[in-house]
Amino acid sequence: MEWRIKLHTDRMKSGVRLSRDFYTRDVLDVAPEVPGKNMVIRLPGGSQERFRITEVEAYRGSEDRACHAFKGRTARTEVMFDQGGKLYIYLIYGMYWMLNIVTGEKDNPQAILIRGVEQYPGPGKLTKSLGIDKSFYGEDLIFSDRIWLEDIGLVQPVKFGPRIGIDYAGEYWKTKPWRYFL
DNA sequence: TCAGTGATTAGG
DNA sequence: CTAATCACTGAG
């Protein structure tokens, strides 16, 4: 019960913005550290809010059949080939914007799908609620004044399991435990 | 379980 | 130009 109270009282507390070095590591090192971090965002109304990230998934390079970079470099996936710390945004099923954070070094395409924050579980629901759309494509979390991540000095135990919604990727990639959540 | 919905992509 | 695909969601 105490952890619930702590989550709530800490929610608005500001932390330290994560720097480039955090993102330029391998996605499998970065992704497990993202749940528990705060996402700071300027909402459509103009107010700045903080949301605790609760669930993410790792997509790792041109070998990962579930990763959009698997099919090579296209206009859509271009930003994944840039250095870590930028946003990869795309539309799915004609309705939902997906929010991803690019990781790794330049020309090593990787990204982390943000699947949920504390108040808005679900990748499509959180982008809709927070007003995240194509205009965030390529946004740099190191310099942006409307969205970034911050460390609030809490280490949360992270659980893990297989990624969601990638049946097409085949048994090997589908079963990799690359989903991380609180 | 299943339809909605439209950008993106590869292929003529 | 066409047609298939799709890191989802909510209704029944």
Image: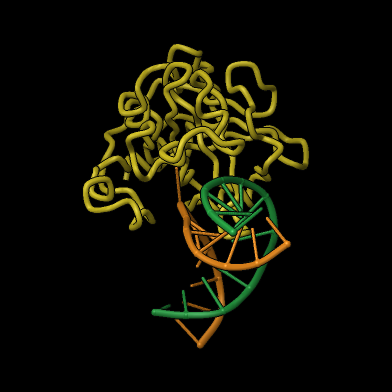
Chain colours: A yellow, B green, C orange
Q: Quadrant of the C terminus of chain A?
A: top left
Q: Is residue A48 visible?
A: yes
In this rendering, the count of numbered labels is 0
**Residue drawn where x is 59% and y is 44% of the image:** A90
User: x, y percentage for residue A4?
Assistant: 38, 43
User: x, y percentage for residue A36?
Assistant: 40, 33
Q: Is A77 placed above or below A141 here? A: below
* Quadrant of res A147: top right
Q: Nearer the viewer, residue A124 or A117?
A: A124
* Quadrant of res A111: top left
User: x, y percentage for residue A95?
Assistant: 62, 58
**Going by the image, does A83 lie left or right of A175?**
right
User: x, y percentage for residue A129?
Assistant: 63, 50
**Going by the image, does A129 lie left or right of C7?**
right
**Residue drawn where x is 49% and y is 28% of the image:** A102
Q: Nearer the viewer, residue B2 or A126?
A: B2
Q: Is A114 placed above or below A14 here? A: below
* Quadrant of res A139: top right
Name the residue furthest right: A45
**Going by the image, does A100 lie left or right of A2?**
right
Q: Is residue A181 visible?
A: no
